[in-house]
Image: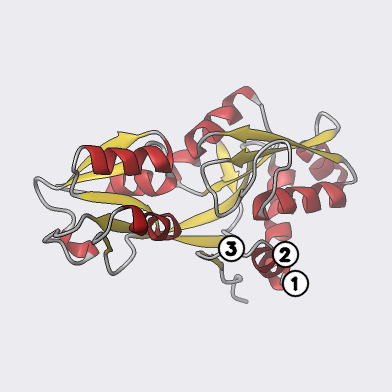
Amino acid sequence: MTSAARAELAPTGKLRVALNYSNFLLVSKRAPEHVGVAPDLGRELAKRLGVQVEFVGYEDAGQVAEGVKTGAWDVAFIGADPARAGEITFTPAYVEIDATYLVPPGSPIHTAHEVDRVGVRIATTARAAYTLHLERTLKHATLVYAEGLPGAFALFVRDRLDVLAGLTQHHLQQLDKLPGARILEGRFTAIQQAIGTPKRRTAAAVYLAAFGEEIRAAGFVTSLIERHGVRGLSVSPLAKG
């Protein structure tokens, strides 16, 4: 590691790691314990830097992205999305998370390809990576926003919306609450979870990209997924060559 990378990653003498609390697949317990794949990756990175880790928690990914504007964190474990790339430099993804649709009992919609139609209302989490994807790609259906995954599910049920967009693993946890509901076949996107650092920290970005490759190649990410018993995460493929 270069001295420039170390200085850019821990300018305050600590590694400030931003966590998205709404991503329960990566953060299973919040402060004070901070348990999960993402916290453990933050600890490993701090260990390699030879500094203490300081976690900075946010309620959703949108708030994490906003935090970069005030210099509140040094690295973030967050979905890599083009809408965030103006302020954040992302590594290649280290894990992928499938995003799918849930429909209520008796829905005439059977596949993900049938969702984007006039009159279809989709409950979704504001500022989530998969929501940003839908904002770019949907042509006819209407998005209806809520705060957080639980809020989106509550909105979906309360307002009798046509579709709920979200993480597959979250949908699986909701099926018992809504008998007859179905997860539509086919994902509408795979969220690329990456390590981000503020723009202009070029030395830090180079080091983080190498770190991300190394922890996948060595099986470290796989071991964390197994240790925490997480379902719904898949390790991203390594760069070819």
Closest to the observer, 87 or 134: 134
- The image quarter containing residue 29 is top right
Q: Note whether residue 106 is visible.
A: yes
In three-dimensional space, the C-alpha distance between marks 2 and 1, rounded to whole angstroms, equals 5 Å
Badge 1 local density, few (<14 within 10 Å), some, or many (20+)? Answer: few
**Left or right for 66, reference 91:** left
Return the residue at label 3.
230
Closest to the observer, 150 or 196: 150
Residue 153, image x and y in percent? 33, 44
Would you place residue 226 above or below residue 145 in this image?
A: below
Q: Note whether residue 1 is visible.
A: no
**Left or right for 139, reference 57:** left
Front disc: 2 or 3: 3
Lower sequence index among marks 1 and 3: 1
Label 2 close to label 1 by CB (< 8 Å):
yes
Badge 2 local density, few (<14 within 10 Å), some, or many (20+)? Answer: some
**What kind of residue is marked 2?**
Ile
Would you place residue 77 above or below residue 111 in this image?
A: above
Q: Secondary structure at mark 3?
A: loop
Lower sequence index among marks 2 and 3: 2
**What kind of residue is marked 1?**
Ala
Label 2 close to label 3 by CB (< 8 Å):
no
Q: Secondary structure at mark 2?
A: helix
In three-dimensional space, the C-alpha distance between marks 1 and 3, rounded to whole angstroms, equals 19 Å
Mark number, residue 218: 1
The C terminus - image quarter: bottom right
Q: Residue at x 58, y 63 (%)?
A: 230
Residue 222, image x and y in percent? 66, 69
Badge 3 local density, few (<14 within 10 Å), some, or many (20+)? Answer: some
Residue 83, image x and y in percent? 43, 40
Return the residue at label 2.
215
